[in-house]
Each structure stands twice: as structure tokens, then as C-alpha cells.
Amino acid sequence: MHHTLHAGRWAAMLIALFTSLSFAQGSAPAESAKPIAMTFTERVQICASCHGADGNSQTNNIPSIAGQPRIFIENVLVLIREGLRSNEVMQAVTKGMSDQDIVALAKHFSALPMQSTPGEPDTALQQRGRLLASKLRCASCHEANFKGRAQMPRLAAQREEVLLTKLIAFRDKPKPGTDTIMNATLHGVKDDELKALAHFLAHVR
Amino acid sequence: MKIQHAALLIASAFAVASTALAQPAAAPPAWQQGMGDKFKDSKLAPNAGRNTETPASDIPLDKLKVPAGFKLELWATGMPGARAMVRGDKGKIYIGTRGIGRVYELTDDGAKRTSRVVVDKLVQPSGVAIQGSTLYVMAIDKMLRFDDIESNPSVAAVDMTDKFSIPPEQHHNWKYLAFGPDKKLYVPFGAPCNICEPPEQYAQIRRYNPDGSGMEVIARGVRNTQGFDWHPKTGELWFTDHGRDWMGDDGPQDELNRMPKSGLNFGYPYCHAEGIVDPDVKKADACKDVTKPVALMGPHAAVMGIKFYTGDMYPAEYKNSMFIARKGSWNRTKRFGYDVVNVRASADGKNVKVTPFLTGFLDTKDNAFSGRPTYILQMPDGALLISDEQLGAIYRVSYVGPAKKK
């Protein structure tokens, strides 16, 4: 573990984060969560505390961000900061981030290497997912190796449960602020097919 | 240890938040229709916008070109996604966006420009129109009015949404808005797909009284118009329209249309451009009674803002000619557009001549682009402002004198 932050300051930032969270979940106005000034290193540490020190998440429902396209990371952070995406934790984290902070964080995490998902895939499930990915033409935007490009995220080796949650959300809940292509692509795809797709993509190396 | 604990807390909060948001599925899409098997390995995809501020020093002004005698300057920066611009009676400029959900207000003190966000968290609020000092903002799912906003910067919005019968589909339903010479508000409702039989409320242009009453559908068969203006002499509506995708690099081309009367059909989805019959959505006599465009504006060019020039600053030959921004292609292997053109035509739409006016955003050698000119606003002195959606910037083009002889 490499704790470069002063322990007191670190605690203050986490408290600020969770204080703002409890307000965000209640009815108090959002302004009660005052952003505190942070250095770039401190911001990276905040990200790493959930998404993994090297940007490869070890935690359920927390996406890996290492090796994601720079523009994709920028867009997600801006959309959450602007309140266009519902994610209370990330809204608290992005509060007070300047555009320059976002550009720097995106550059940092996009440059980190992604790690393969540990363990062996279920080959039957993987094959079903592979066929579906081909049928849905996922690779035409996300690239043949599913590493993503520009505004289109890396799917390869993303956490399986994260992929499944996102796929279901795209199918069921059109997201404001983005193109509608993912909603259209996944329209009518059944849950067990999405499970196979998530399994396949999580195990792309 | 603390850190791990925090991560778990956050993870569980996120899981709860995501489940709570599940909603019923959307209507069936037409996305795959029109993307035939020969494109299954195509890597063409919409260009990524930029949602963060581009510093002035990163804007490649030295590469941009205007005709001799004209001067281009960087007039305002720092407004990610800046699209259509309108100017109030008191000189403030309001600017719509799409993905970033904001409307900006720009104030010019003569020496420098400063901007603020008037309203945010909207779903693609690209439609802005102004009457006097009353600003109208239209997002995909919302219509807002800000009374006398130039004098009352913190005025609360009046929500007019219920008055405008806005249909639910998002695709191609980000707006361009404008008041016509008849003081009515003109609003397009694009086809909610690349190519499909559009449901009744789509692929049309409507006009309303400013309060939302008196709605009329004035044109049909319009796929996705993102710009219109009225001829200074005839008062007729002219509008740009985007051609469909996934029919190859060469077309069908984008259109410049003229609407001499209401009730015309402009062809979509059966008949495109100069009379190209759609290969996917078919009917007999596909082009019968279709009003053809006055000009073809290039394949996948993404024709955006159109402005008839009525100022006195530019040389006389520009009077009543059009300036049209072409934001540039995505569904084409060799990029096309990324410029502003000057279009001259007779009032009946004949004798069209298209000439480059602002160029240099497109690098044909690397098939790359630096900026995307999107809309045009004529200032009281006759200079043109041109917005760049990609770089969140506004350029000013003035005429400074006769071209120097070499």
C-alpha cells in the first residue's frame, strides 16, 4: 500500500464525500456538499480507492477504468458532474472538478494498462456471447479487440457484473445526453443473452 | 482497510441506485434497418464530441482560411458544445448545446467576451430562439421560456412543455428553432431513425404561435433539418436537411430546400436528394409529388446553419446570398465538409453556385478534422459569427477591405 496522503487530510476528504452523499440521498439541497480543493494526486487517490490503485477494480459493481479511451472517461465525468447521469457517489466525487481536472484524470487512467479477468470462462456461455457480439456488431464501434475508441468504451476485461448492469440499463432505460444507438442495439435482447454477452466480453484478453 | 470499506459502501450505494432506475423498454428501433450486410465490418461511427473546454491556445486558427479581404478572428472560447446562437435586443447572445445539456449566455463588453450557463441538466437543449429579450429554449423533452432574460439574468423559466405536444423519441429530435417573419415559432421533428417509416408526429416541420397554440404541420418528408432561414426578398423558408446513412460514401447527398408554400412533401423516407429511390423503405412512385432540393450539398456533409446575408459590411455580391455551415461527415470513409460555404441562387432556387468560404478544419491527408463549424449569426455591424461545436468556440468573420493584388 502506498499512502502518500496525510492521514488527516485523507479522512477529511472521505468525510466530505460521505457527508455530501447522505445529503444527496436526503432532501437537503445539493449545495450543502461543499467541494474541497484537491491536488491532482489526491483526486487520483480518490478514484483509486474504489476503482483500484492501478485502475483495475477489485470490487463488485465498480468498473475498471484503466485503459479506457480518454474521451470516454472525459464524457462520463462531465455528464455525471453536470447532473445528466444519476450516480450519487460519482456526483459527489466529481463535484468541484474543473474541466482541466477531468482532462488530466482521463489522460492518467486511459494510459494505465488493463488487466485480464482472472479465472477461466465457461466456454459454452462464452461462445453464445461471442455469436451475439457478432450479430449485434459490437466490434464496429468498440473495435475487433473490444478495446474501445474515442467516446466508445473498452468492453474487454471489464468486470462481468458491471457489463451486465450496463447492458440491462441501456436496454431498459435510455440515457439522456448520449446517442440512442446503444438503446437501439440492445432493444429486445433477453436477459440470458445479455449474461452470455457480459461473460464473453469480461473474458476477452 | 478504511479504503476498502469505503469502496464497498460506495458499491452498494451504486447498486441500489441502478436498480431503482429500471424502466420499461423503448419502442422498437430502426437502427439496423438500412445498415446492410455489406457494412457489417464497417468501423464508421459518429464522431466524438468534446465536452471539456478547449483552451484558446489549442484552437488552430492559423490553419483556417477565408477569402481575400476577409478577416477571421477567435471571438469567444470555453463553451463546450456551442451550437445555434441567437442575439437579444440588448446584445446578449444565447447559445444551445446537445450532449452537455447547457445553454450559455455570452456578454460582449467590446474588448472581451464572458459567458455563463443560463440553464443546464437539460436533454440536448440545442433549440434557442429569441423575441426581443424573451428567450425560448427547446430540449428534446422540454420547452422553456425565459422572460426578459437580458435584464433579469436569474429569471425563473416558464415551463411551456405541455403546450407543444412533444413526441417521445430522442433520435434526430434535438431542435433547431427560429421565429419566422410571421412571428411564429418554427420547429422541426426529425425522423427517429436513420431510415424507417416515421410515425405520424415525425419527419416534419411545424409552426406554432409563441405560446404553443395554433400548431400546423407545414412540411413533411423532412428527415433531419438542423437549420433554416427566410429569403430576404420573398419571405420563403429555405432549409437544410441531412441525407440518410449507410448507402455508401457518395450519398444520398444532403439537401438545401426551398419551401414556396406549406404542405409540401420533401421525400423522406422513399425518395432522397435528386430523386434517389430508397432501397430499404419502398413504395410505388416513390418520388411522385416530391419537392426536390434546390441544391445538393455534399454526401454526409451534415449541413447545419443557414443564413441569408443582409448586412452592409460584406461586398455587394454577398447581399441576399446564403452562408451554410457543413459540420462534416461521419458515415463516409473519406471525410467531407467541415467548412462554411457561400451559396448564391436566384430567388426561385435556380442558378445555384456553391463556393467555399471558411475552410481549413479538414486535413484530407490524414482524414482528420480539427473543428466543426455549425451555426452562423449575423451581427448588427454585418460581421458573421460562426460557432464551432467541437472546440466550443465562436469565430468572427469581418470584411476589412478590397483584396490586395499580388
Image (tube, coloured by chain):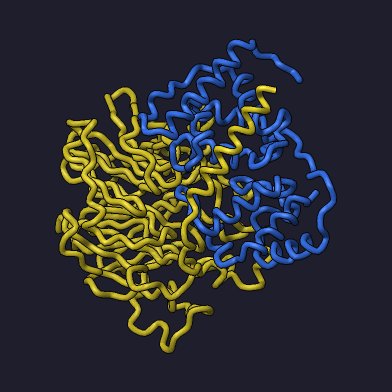
Chain colours: A blue, B yellow
Can you say whether B256 is above or below B269 in the image? above
Camera-side residue of B128 and B109? B128
Extreme-right residue of the structure? A120
**Rendering coords of residue B370 (x, y %):** 54, 42
The answer to whether residue B305 is visible is yes
Determine the residue positioned at 44% across, 74% down: B272
Specify whether A180 is left or right of B131. right
**Rendering coords of residue A162 (x, y %):** 65, 47
Quarter of the view holding residue B314: top left
Q: Quadrant of the N terminus of chain A?
A: top right
Quarter of the view holding residue B274: bottom left
Specify whether A69 is left or right of A15. right
Specify whether A26 is left or right of A121. left
Determine the residue positioned at 61% across, 49% down: A152
**Rendering coords of residue B284 (x, y %):** 43, 89
Can you say whether B181 is above or below A5 in the image? below
Camera-side residue of A52 and B202? A52
Determine the residue positioned at 53% across, 34% down: A90
**Rendering coords of residue B374 (x, y %):** 41, 48
Exactly how many numbered labels are in the figure? 0
Determine the residue positioned at 44% across, 60% down: B171
Can you say whether B309 is above or below A11 in the image? below
The answer to whether residue B401 is visible is no
Camera-side residue of B195 and B182? B195
